[in-house]
Image (cartoon, helix red, strand yellow):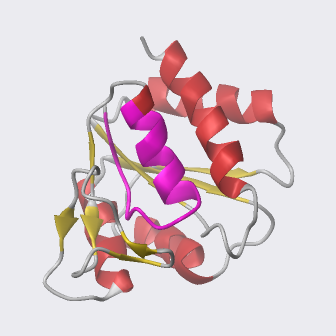
Amino acid sequence: MKIISGAQTGVDRAALDAAMEASLPHGGFIPKGRLAEDGRISPNYRLTETAESDYALRTELNVMAGKATLIIHHGSMSGGTKYTAWLVRKHKKPACLINLEKTGFQEAVREIIAFLTRIKPAVLNVAGPRESTCPGIYEQTKAILLQVFAKDD
């Protein structure tokens, strides 16, 4: 399974880092200029720059490139996370939404594994809030995904 995301801080970056740590292929679309809220996205990530610096474009390209999308969030969705959920419906893609406000760590791991077992996506798009709007979401997401990827061996 290949993991893709838009490489923004928070959930997106955690997914790429967990994939790299688990030796899974990774990728995804990012805005022209390798833009993220913390500056330029490291060239260590194997990502494709879009022709524009538009975050919405890269979000839609990642939803379309993924065979399924995993959205991890905390509380109600807003901004790019809410837009991703809308795009998933628009493009009729399978999705797993994990709200960490209501779902504990082990339950999240089980739900994601069950989703991946059922859907078997060759490419999984992972999305969620930025670290600045949801402090701690990077560490939570990375820990959850490392558990999920360890069970995927």
Does the segment drawn in magenta span residue 120? Answer: no
Q: Nearer the viewer, residue 140 or 105?
A: 140
In the picture provided, is 89 more to the left or to the right than 35?
A: right
Q: How many marks?
A: 0
Position of 29 relative to 58 (above/below): above
State the quadrant of the N terminus. Answer: top left
Q: Residue at x 29, y 81 (%)?
A: 57
- Specify the quadrant that holds the C terminus: top left
Nearest the viewer among 141 and 121 is 141
Residue range highlighted in magenta = 2-20
Residue 54 shown left or right of residue 140 in the figure: left
What residue sits 24% from the left and 81% below the top? 33
Q: Is residue 60 above or below residue 67?
A: below
Instruction: Identify which residue is drawn at 71% across, 36% down.
Output: 108
Query: Percent position (x, y) of residue 18?
Result: 48, 36
Q: Residue lying furthest top in this view?
A: 153
- The quarter holding residue 120 reads top left
x and y, in percent, of residue 46 in the image? 22, 51
Residue 135: image location, x then y, percent: 75, 64
In the displayed orientation, state which residue is furthest to the left. Answer: 51
Residue 119 percent coordinates (x, y)? 41, 33
**Which residue is found at the position 59% from the left and 61% from the top?**
10
